Structure formats: structure tokens, C-alpha cells
Amino acid sequence: MKELYAANPVMFKNNPLGFIATLILCLVGIGFIIFLVWHLKNKSSRLVVTDEDVLFEQGLLSKERSELNIKSIRTVKVKQSFWNRVFGTGTIELYTAGDSPEIVAKGLPDPNTVRDIIKAND
């Protein structure tokens, strides 16, 4: 299996105003705790797209893994606000047979790349 895309959610590009506000709160002291929790949350989520599968892992101590075969994915939805488009991030939703998404990955860099890879390997 060849890994075509692998990424964790990003902090600044996904939420620049929250990042700046947390920097300001670092002057008070509570910002460091917010940064630590935010960083651990982002590092504990990972989306990996190979030429056959899509794997989404979440969790630091306990893990939740979702794995989909690319051929079973029917719809790839990319959601981007104006600021997400400016900074190149977004939310990826992968649907198979139902009305609710099987995988929802928020704050990933280059979400349109994921859509293009999945559609090219479909």
C-alpha cells in the first residue's frame, strides 16, 4: 500500500483568531494549558489515504479507528469557510451508503487534495 496523503489537523491555519487569542492568554498563564490541550487533540487525530484505503484515527489514550475501502466511498464532501479557503484547510466528510458520514475529519490541510486522490483511485 502506498501512502498518498497523511495529515493531522492544523492549529493556526484552521483557527487563526483562536490561536491569536490563546497567545494573548499566554500572558495571563492560562494560554499554555489551552495550547497544550489543543495540540494534544490535534496530534491525536490523523487521516491517512493510501491507494486502497482511508484510515482515520482519533484518541490519545483510547483509540477509535475508522477504515474505509476507497471503492466503497460514494461521496466526498469538502466544507470550507472563507477563512478556511484563505488558509487552505477544511473539513472532509466521507459517505458510503447511508445519509450520515462515516468519517468526519476537521481542520485538515489541503482537503481538496484528499477529494482528488479518492476520486482518482475510485
Image (cartoon, rainbow, N blue to C red):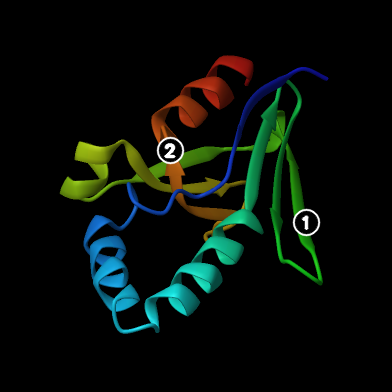
Mark 2 or 1: the one toward you: 2
Q: Nearer the viewer, residue 22 or 69?
A: 22
Q: Which mark is residue 65?
A: 1
Residue at 30% from the left image edge and 84% from the top image edge:
28
Total labels: the figure holds 2
Report whether 103 appears left or right of 115.
right
User: Residue 110: x and y, percent?
Assistant: 41, 32
Q: Alpha carbon of mark 2 to alpha carbon of mark 1: how far?
A: 20 Å
Looking at the rendered structure, the kind of residue marked 2 is Pro
Residue at 45% from the left image edge and 74% from the top image edge:
32
Looking at the rendered structure, the kind of residue marked 1 is Arg
Callout 2: 10 Å neighbours few (<14), some, many (20+)? many
Report whether 103 appears left or right of 2.
left
N-terminal label among 2 and 1? 1
- Outermost residue, left direction? 82
Residue at 53% from the left image edge and 61% from the top image edge:
39
Say which quadrant the N terminus sits in.
top right
Q: Secondary structure at mark 1?
A: strand
* Mark 2 lies on residue: 109
Above or below, comparing residue 63 to residue 96 in the picture: below
User: Residue 87: x and y, percent?
Assistant: 26, 39
Report whether 41 appears left or right of 17.
right
